[in-house]
Amino acid sequence: MYPALNEAIAFVSFYGNDPSNMFADLPGAIKSQLTYQASIYNTTGRYARALAERSYNFTAGDWARGMAAAIETFLTEAWFEGMAQNEYQADEMTPEMQENLDGIIRDEKSFLPDLAAWISETVDRIRPIDAAWPALHARLDVWANRWLDVKNQAIRATSEPDAKEMWVMGNTEQHCETCSALNGLVAYVSEWETAGFRPQSPPNSLLSCGGWRCDCSRVPTTKRRTKKVLDRLLDIAAARSL
């Protein structure tokens, strides 16, 4: 999305400052995504500093409650943003969609204990806290990227099978071999699903990046369908399985 801005927001938030002025003028969807990122980094930064200082002013329970609230609030917003891409309103959420979203939120929360243990071990092993920043940043970036993944899941859930979508790479500095091969291809939703190519969705065995830090998207388009696109998609998928 905005690599330099993402880095700045992560750093500022981790050290307890409010970065909202950095993205106040950006569109609502981007603002929601960046606010989720800032919330994750701010909450974890407070917890990591408390661990490093042997302080009890921000406990593991405080961290877990903060993370759970951010997950529920902002991943719900991400789902609504995905619905809006296909001109669905929030009140048009079907029971099946709600079940999907509830499962995403439930699964994400289930990983919090493992993340908490990892943060504690990392802060204890790497001192001072500034030295632990690169490791913490790399792990938290994967969590922050979940917002885009949920948005894309909602887009797929509300897309008609005969609608066309184009694979568009994000703004990461380096793209994996698979995403580069898919970039610009236009196919029907049903063809994308037949081949199995979805952005993010980690662990994603069809993408050489695994989907962990992928910021690509399948976006609705009126462009012409790529010639013999299903054959191309299946060939790329087959190459990944070799």
Image (cartoon, rainbow, N blue to C red):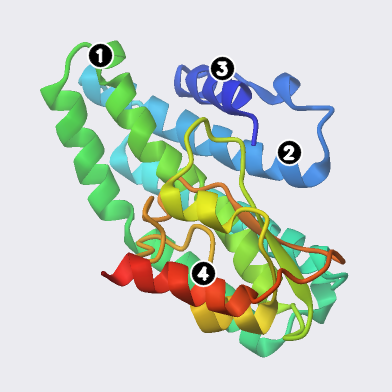
Q: Quadrant of the N terminus?
A: top right
Q: Amino acid at mark 3?
A: Asn
Residue 5 x %, y %: 62, 23
Secondary element under disc 3, as helix, strand or loop, is loop
Report, in whole angstroms, how far the alpha carbon at label 3 lies from the one at label 4. 38 Å
Q: Earlier in the sequence, mark 1 or mark 4?
A: 1
Residue 131: image tag: 1
Report, in whole angstroms, how far the alpha carbon at label 3 lies from the one at label 2. 17 Å
Q: Residue at x 54, y 35 (%)?
A: 172
What residue would you read off at disc 2?
31
Q: Earlier in the sequence, mark 1 or mark 3?
A: 3
Residue 54 x %, y %: 20, 21
Q: Earlier in the sequence, mark 3 or mark 4?
A: 3
Residue 17: image tag: 3
Secondary element under disc 2, as helix, strand or loop, is helix
Report, in whole angstroms, how far the alpha carbon at label 1 lies from the one at label 3. 19 Å
User: Residue most toward the front?
Assistant: 227
Q: Amino acid at mark 4?
A: Phe
Q: Is residue 231 above or below residue 35?
A: below
Name the image quarter holding residue 30: top right
Residue 163: image tag: none
Residue 35 x %, y %: 64, 37
Residue 197: image tag: 4
Secondary element under disc 1, as helix, strand or loop, is helix
